Amino acid sequence: MSTDPLRAAKTRLRRLVVDRILSLDPADRLRQEQVLLERFSTLPGFDRATVILLFVAHLPEEVPTRGMIELALERGKIVVCPRVDRQERRLRLFQVKHFDRDLVPGPFGIPEPKPGALEIGPEQIDWALIPGIAFDAQGSRLGRGAGYYDRLLPLLNPNAPRLALVLDPQWVDELPTEPHDQPVHGVVGCQRSWLSPQLPVL
């Protein structure tokens, strides 16, 4: 498959999955989100991790992460969140000590670490929760198309587990992939989960 048809297929799949998420019954959506929050701290490697990368959910189709960030802080983790560097087209990582005080709206409206936060090198991350629109049971991930996480993930500590928490509609049988697409080590949902045999052990 040539690149243009592949990208078109990804675009169609993004729209389909987002529509499926937004079409969930509100009560079912809330139930799934609560299950995922409860499973967050049980994910492989979380207990032993010290420096963890979390994303700040903002869009209506995303799994809320505020509760996860606050729980990680309560557990004494060093929590790191990304800030978009539009000029260099990359994510820079900064420590967040308090959800409300340390996050401000970024260029896309997504809350990001405020200026003056301590920058953390990606190689210092030893556990990561990775966002995405869709995932399959091989760990393939469909992001939003800008490639920010595909550029970041190879820079993380190679022993850091990369995991995703997903709503039921985010599972697909098989994702179209390109050579630069970065997979995750595990995908955990309400009805099904997948963990790679190569999942790093801290």
Image: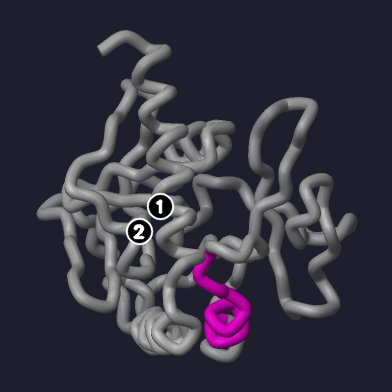
In this view, 173 is above or below 99:
above
**What residue is rendered at 47% in x and 35% in y?**
150
Residue mark closest to the camera, 2 vs 1: 1
Quick check: 130 left or right of 89? Answer: left
Q: Position of residue 172 (x, y in %)?
A: 25, 51
Q: Position of residue 98 (x, y in %)?
A: 75, 80
Q: Quadrant of the C terminus?
A: bottom left
Q: Secondary structure at mark 1?
A: helix
Dot label at residue 25: none
Residue type, label 2: Gln
Q: Position of residue 36 (x, y in %)?
A: 39, 80
Q: Quadrant of the N terminus?
A: top left
Residue type, label 1: Val
**What residue is rendered at 31% in x and 68% in y?**
168
**What residue is rendered at 61% in x and 65% in y?**
60
Which residues are the magenta region? 62-72
Callout count = 2
Furthest-left residue in this view = 197
Q: Position of residue 166 (x, y in %)?
A: 37, 66
Q: Secondary structure at mark 2?
A: helix
Badge 1 crowding class, 10 Å Cα cut-off, few under 14, some 14 to 19, many 20 or more, is some
Question: Quadrant of residue 79 in the image?
Answer: bottom right
Q: Is residue 70 magenta?
A: yes
In depth, the one of 113 and 174 nearer the eye is 174
Q: Earlier in the sequence, mark 2 or mark 1?
A: 1
Is the stretch drawn in magenta largely helix, strand or loop? helix
Q: Which residue is mark 1?
A: 17
Furthest-top residue in this view = 2
Q: Which residue is mark 2?
A: 170
Badge 2 crowding class, 10 Å Cα cut-off, few under 14, some 14 to 19, many 20 or more, is many
